[in-house]
Amino acid sequence: MMTKSLWDIAVEQHRENERENKDKKDSVLLLIGSKKGGKSSICYKFLERTETPKSSLALEYLFGRRNKGIESGKEICHIWELGGGTLFMDLLEIPITPENLWNLSVVLVLDLSKAEELWYTMQTLLDAVKKQIDRALESSKDPKAKDKLLEIAKSRIPNGHEDFSAIEPFPVPLLIIGSKYDLFQGEDFQKRKLICKSLRYIAHTYAASLMFTSTKSETLITKARVSISAMVFGTSSSKTTVSDHNKPLYICAGADSYESIGSFTTLNVENKTLPRSLEAVKNIFSSHFPQVESRNIIPDDPASDPHFKEPDIDNMRAQKKKELVEYKKKQKSIYRLNI
């Protein structure tokens, strides 16, 4: 029997890893949420990038890598960030495709300091994502794709959960992050209580995870980074639930319950009846915080933004602009001569 050398063993191990990873696809992460709500900052913290993030223009692309070890190689996560709040929702067709559905995770970042836009932003963006998922399913070559995706979604609800029949899981893994907790924690207790209960109800109904964070707290931003890593790379994360409304919430998917969330306070009078639907919670929330549509203003031309300076491109652009001006002058002269 021939003795294998270390090189032979290494080659065999490499081929085995290649066979195991052949069918594995890169994960896809989609960040959506409030305009200037901190999506880019959270993304940069997840990627452990130290530079200050630039303002997102429309749909930004980044990628993250996780080293699984010398033998296993690296995992890749393709990251898409939808800028502008609800302005560029048509671009969702780029990251949400029939091929990406099975590896897609969504992070919804909601600005806790803007209660008057919170529900509108949440509902508008999640509805848009679900519609694009439906379109992607319709384009799928697998006629059972929708049923398979629903089955996977339901698996995120713990077996035997008391609210199993009432939960309507989001089609893909969803993490809801309440940002700017540093501003939120100084608000009136009743306001914080209603917002916390409402977000818990939303997250629980969608079988989503929920957490509050602040870029000014290293502890909270680390928890956010760990939670996102668990979504896209399958790494471990804390399972400890924090549901105290005086603290930054941290509740994993399926760890909450409608009974635990309890009834809602309306006009400072306790309503002893538990809400029966998201629509009922929306009505209570909107009665306290009338929702306004966030102003969708087209961003300024990035070419004039000092944060996006590219000397070679800028010089060429200036040259072409000059040539265009000269061309227009020449055309006007020709037009006058012809007259």
Image (spheres, grey):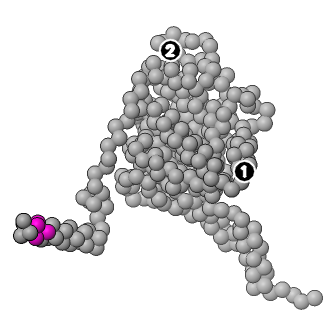
Specify the segment rendered in magenta. Answer: 331-335
**Compared with residue 184, is residue 149 higher up or lower down, i.e. above or below?**
below
Q: Residue 98: percent from the left, percent from the top?
A: 62, 55
Q: Nearer the viewer, residue 21 or 44?
A: 21
Q: Residue at point 31% right, 61% down?
A: 308
Secondary element at tag 1: loop
Res 143 label: 1
**Compared with residue 170, is residue 62 higher up or lower down, i.e. above or below?**
below
User: Is residue 120 magenta-colored?
Assistant: no
Looking at the rendered structure, the kind of residue marked 1 is Pro
Q: Residue at point 93% right, 88% down?
A: 1
Majority secondary structure of magenta residues: helix
Secondary element at tag 2: strand
The residue positioned farthest toward the top in the image shown: 269
Q: Residue 139: percent from the left, percent from the top?
A: 62, 53
Q: Residue 115: percent from the left, percent from the top?
A: 43, 29
**Which one is earlier in the sequence, the residue at label 1 or at label 2?**
1
Q: Residue 131: percent from the left, percent from the top?
A: 56, 42
Q: Which residue is mark 2?
A: 266
Looking at the rendered structure, the kind of residue marked 2 is Thr
**Compared with residue 323, is residue 78 higher up or lower down, i.e. above or below?**
above
